[in-house]
Image: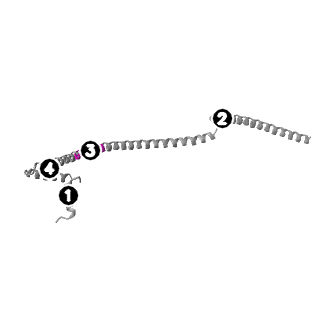
Amino acid sequence: MATDDEIIRKRLLLDGDGSGDEKRLVTFMKSFIKWCNNPQDDEISTNATFERLLAMLATCQTAIAKNYLVYQMNKRELENYRTINEELTNRIKRAQDDICNLKEELQEAKKTRRHQQEYDALGKVIKKHPNKEETTKILTALESQEAVEKELDEELELRRKQLYALVHAINLMKASLSNN
């Protein structure tokens, strides 16, 4: 004997999407066969059964049309999702490319900033020292001062020699005066 789970599974499989379409078709087929096999019924009940069959057929056709429309909608949605997926994939690729480009720009900016900082540091060191014109003036002044000092040293040396000669001459004169 079949368990309750098996019975429920079979009914769900027969029912399709759960809207009772299969049951409607089975009921319609049974009613149609019954209507065809009972030609002795009176005309009013035959017409009522016929109208009921037409109503059941219309319901089945509506369900089929509805299912077809749902199918078409699902196809369009699937295509729409594919398009969206492609668009998102392309946007992701562009974003990844942009990220790579921005990373390169960032590295270049870091390099430029590092160079700028080095330049600024060198500029500060250079500013501590006088410029070329001032340095040249100072060197020229020092060279002229050195030349003046050299001249003064030479003159001093000459004066020293002269003084030494004078002192020597005075000592000689003293010695000669002391002897006389």
The amino acid type found where label 1 is placed reads: Arg
Q: CA distance from mark 3 to mark 2?
A: 87 Å
Residue at 23% x, 47% y is 67
The amino acid type found where label 4 is placed reads: Thr
Region rendered in magenta: 66-81
Residue 148 lies, in percent from the top left, at 73, 35
Q: Reading the chain from its start, which is encountered first: label 3 or label 1?
A: 1
Contact (Cβ within 8 Å) of mark 2 with mark 1 = no
Secondary structure that dominates the magenta span: helix
Residue 60 lies, in percent from the top left, at 19, 48
Q: CA distance from mark 3 to mark 1?
A: 27 Å
Say which residue label 1 marks.
11
The secondary structure type at the circle numbered 1 is helix
Q: CA distance from mark 1 to mark 4?
A: 27 Å
The secondary structure type at the circle numbered 4 is helix
Say which residue label 3 marks.
73
Q: Reading the chain from its start, which is encountered first: label 1 or label 4?
A: 1
